[in-house]
Structures are given as C-alpha cells and as structure tokens.
Amino acid sequence: EPEVTQTPSHQVTQMGQEVILRCVPISNHLYFYWYRQILGQKVEFLVSFYNNEISEKSEIFDDQFSVERPDGSNFTLKIRSTKLEDSAMYFCASREREGGNEQFFGPGTRLTVL
Amino acid sequence: SQKIEQNSEALNIQEGKTATLTCNYTNYSPAYLQWYRQDPGRGPVFLLLIRENEKEKRKERLKVTFDTTLKQSLFHITASQPADSATYLCALDMWGSQGNLIFGKGTKLSVKP
C-alpha cells in the first residue's frame, strides 16, 4: 500500500542551526502539507502546497520556514535559525485531489532543538 | 477563529462496550469533518469523513454523526477492543481552505480487557 515517508525520524540540532526535513508524498497525490505537533498538544497546520507553490500558510509559518518540491518527488521543509520552541514532531501529509478526501500522514520527524 | 473541543482528554471503557467521543466546534460549519486515529509517536491515520449535508456515516464498527445545528460530531466505536486504544482526533476541513485541517486536541481512549 502506498505511504508517505519522512526522513530523518529524529533530528537533534543546536539552537540557531538550519534543518531540512524531508518527505516523499504518495506519487499520484497533488496536494501536500506540513503540520507540527508540540509534545502533548494538538496537531497544527503549517503550510499547504499545490502546483509547485504555497497555497496557504498559517501564522506559525513565518520567514523562518520555507518549503520546496525540488524534483517532483521530494517535499522539504526548511527551518532556519532554529529556536528551542521549534522542538516538535513535524508531519508531512498528502492528498490525492481537491475537496473532501482523506489526508495521508507520514510517520513524522521528531525535531529536538538544544 | 475556529475552535474545536473534544469532550474529554481521556475515556476509559470496558472491552465490548461502545465508546462515544464528542467533537464540538464554534463558528462556521466545515465542509467536511474528519476523524483520525493517532498512536503514540506516530502520524494520524484517517478513519472516516462526513460531509456537511450528511447526518451519519458508517464503516465496519465505526459510526460518525454530524449535527450542524448543535455544531457537534459524535464518533462511536461499537464492540470495542483493547486494540482500539489510541488517541482519536477530530479535524475540520473548512470551506474555501486548501484542505488544511484544523485539529482538536484529541481524546485518549483506553479499552480494558
């Protein structure tokens, strides 16, 4: 069964460093998303991506963050100048088409900022 | 902004009983309301979706109801099993959004044998 994959599963970084989280969405899906979940809190939307551009972003997704789909299969989230409060699980998700259908989530990357 | 409340943080039931989880929201009704299951340290897994104009949806032992007047969805698991123990998340897919989901905090269900 097709699935969304994410690498690495766990990333530890020093405050102020840049990290890149990688995702491979399901191949025939057109809509891509990043969410984050701080430990013990709810899953929060960061950004959606369609047709090679950002379609929507939340207040969390400020200039510190960027997304890219460099090669038609990978979907990356870059976090510049990481802060302690960026520590969270980051989930990638993809969806086949617009409107009224499920999102498939990856297993997540646990980011720890020291 | 839209707020979602899931009735309790934790729900403990006996195996074989029906678990009923509640999701309440404020403001506008979503185009679609979705339920996901999340196990510790894992990503959410889709279970069921119900449209704004639907009242009820079923899938095997799962049933979802949607009442836009009450701004509430109920999620039922019948004949519950210990393997159903997980956190269940309610998520709203709003009109005009690009499909980004607004999640509730979830209800942690524990089914005791």
Image (tube, rainbow, N blue to C red):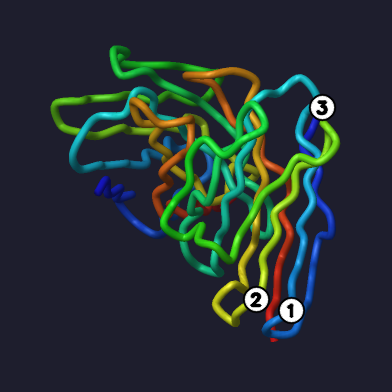
Q: On the same chain: label 2 and label 1?
A: yes
Which residue is denoted by mark 2 in the rendering?
A: A82
N-terminal-most mark, 2 or 3? 3
Q: Quadrant of residue B65?
A: top left
SS class of the residue under badge 1?
loop
* Location of residue A13 in the rendering, given as x and y in whole percent from the top left corner: 77, 79
Disc nearest the viewer among 1 and 3 = 1
The residue that disc 3 covers is A2
Residue at left offset 80%, top offset 25%: A27
Dot 2 alpha-carbon crowd within 10 angstroms: few under 14, some 14 to 19, many 20 or more: many
- Tell me residue A47's x, y (percent): 54, 46
User: Which residue corresponds to the image point at 33% horizontal and 56% vertical from the top-left?
Assistant: B8
In the image, A97 versus A40, the foreground residue is: A97
Q: CA distance from mark 2 to mark 1?
A: 6 Å
- Above or below, A38 against B60 in this view is below
Badge 3 crowding class, 10 Å Cα cut-off, few under 14, some 14 to 19, many 20 or more, is few
Disc 1 residue type (three-letter): Gln
In percent of the image, x 67 and y 65: which residue is there?
Answer: A79
In the drawing, does residue B79 fall left or right of residue A11? Answer: left
Is the Cβ of the residue at disc 2 closer than 8 Å to that at disc 3? no
Q: Which residue is at a point 56% across and 69% down the rendered structure image?
A: A39
Q: Label 1 to label 3, Cα distance in Å?
A: 33 Å
**Residue corresponding to mark 1:** A17
Q: Could you say where residue A70 lies in the image, as x and y percent from the top left?
A: 81, 41
